[in-house]
């Protein structure tokens, strides 16, 4: 949630970051079409925004934590992003075919969870990743097999242990599992099962950290959006297939899952 005086940092799939003041983003009602992000930022062809972080102050001791599709992770001091440039700057150096998939702000006490398309997850303390400069490429966060990719990053603290992780798959299935059921290991491993990937489920497309009173938005590749309360989704163990989250049409796939912002929940 951002105020009009905050800065929003927009991180792209190509590892760049762009800035805009919140008041520069046009306001619109819920039913409005809105304005395409490409009209607000100097994005290159094929470049997409993958994370948006509101920042009020560039505090010492805070870091920006990043995860890429090939399992690389990196954290950089937040103050290194305190000098905006109109053309954007490099947040992480990426090789061809690797994309930035998740970004968040940490304070040195957090755990990180990396979720793969194959239904695996690795959880480790952020202290295992030392701060690096913006031009650095990062270190191994999770080991992937050929054809697999990281699809989501979750950042959590000690006060999140009573919450659940909602994992969703491309064929519209998913489940909630207590965060406490995800064991803490070292970074770089292959991880443990988060959800069973089967012919029925298909690959994992995303995971979000939620509470019982939260809502999520499910988005399909046909442009269909469904909003649902998380408490309507079963809480089960990690090594299970889950339940149907959304009915899909022939050939239609689930493309994304996002937690609905708290300010919208109260409307």
Image (spheres, helix red, strand yellow):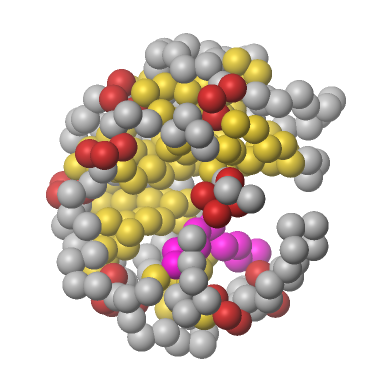
Residue 145 visible in the picture: no
Q: Is residue 60 above or below residue 263?
A: below
Q: Is residue 25 magenta?
A: no
Left or right of residue 108, residue 170 in this image = right
Left or right of residue 17, residue 199 in this image = right
Could you say where residue 120 lies in the image, as x and y percent from the top left? 40, 27
Tell me which residue sits at (64%, 14%) in the image.
200
Q: Is residue 102 above or below residue 194?
A: below
Image-quadrant location for residue 150: top left
Tell me which residue sits at (18%, 54%) in the image.
108
Left or right of residue 47, residue 66 in this image = left
Q: Is residue 88 above or below residue 109?
A: below
Q: What secondary structure do most residues of the magenta stretch adopt?
A: strand
Could you say where residue 238 lies in the image, as x and y percent from the top left? 40, 17
Image-quadrant location for residue 42: bottom right
Q: Nearer the viewer, residue 14 or 239?
A: 239
The magenta-colored residue range is 45-54
Could you say where residue 17 lies in the image, as x and y percent from the top left? 46, 72
Q: Is residue 197 above or below residue 159?
A: above
Image-quadrant location for residue 79: bottom left
| Residue placed furthest toward the front | 267
Q: Is residue 51 magenta?
A: yes
Tell me which residue sits at (78%, 45%) in the image.
223
Residue 154 visible in the picture: yes
């Amino acid at each position: 949630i951002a105020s009009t005086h905050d800065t929003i940092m927009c991180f792209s799939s190509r590892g760049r970051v762009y800035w805009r003041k919140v008041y520069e983003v046009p306001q619109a009602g819920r039913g409005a079409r809105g304005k395409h992000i490409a009209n607000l930022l100097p994005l290159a062809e094929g470049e997409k925004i993958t994370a948006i972080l509101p920042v009020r102050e560039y505090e010492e001791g805070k870091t920006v934590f990043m995860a890429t599709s090939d399992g690389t992770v990196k954290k950089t001091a937040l103050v290194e992003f305190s000098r905006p440039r109109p053309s954007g700057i490099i947040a992480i150096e990426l090789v061809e075919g690797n994309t930035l998939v998740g970004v968040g702000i940490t304070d040195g006490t957090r755990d990180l969870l990396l979720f793969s398309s194959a239904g695996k997850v690795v959880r480790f303390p952020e202290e295992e990743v030392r701060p690096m400069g913006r031009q650095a490429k990062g270190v191994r966060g999770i080991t992937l097999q050929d054809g697999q990719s990281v699809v989501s990053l979750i950042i959590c603290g000690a006060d999140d242990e009573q919450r659940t992780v909602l994992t969703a798959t491309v064929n519209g299935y998913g489940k909630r599992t207590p965060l406490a059921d995800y064991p803490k290991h070292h970074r770089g491993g292959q991880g443990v099962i988060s959800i069973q990937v089967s012919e029925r489920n298909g690959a994992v497309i995303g995971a979000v950290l939620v509470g019982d009173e939260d809502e999520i938005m499910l988005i399909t590749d046909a442009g269909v959006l469904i909003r649902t309360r998380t408490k309507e989704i079963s809480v089960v163990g990690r090594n299970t297939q889950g339940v149907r989250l959304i009915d899909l049409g022939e050939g239609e796939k689930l493309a994304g899952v996002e937690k609905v912002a708290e300010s919208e929940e109260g409307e």
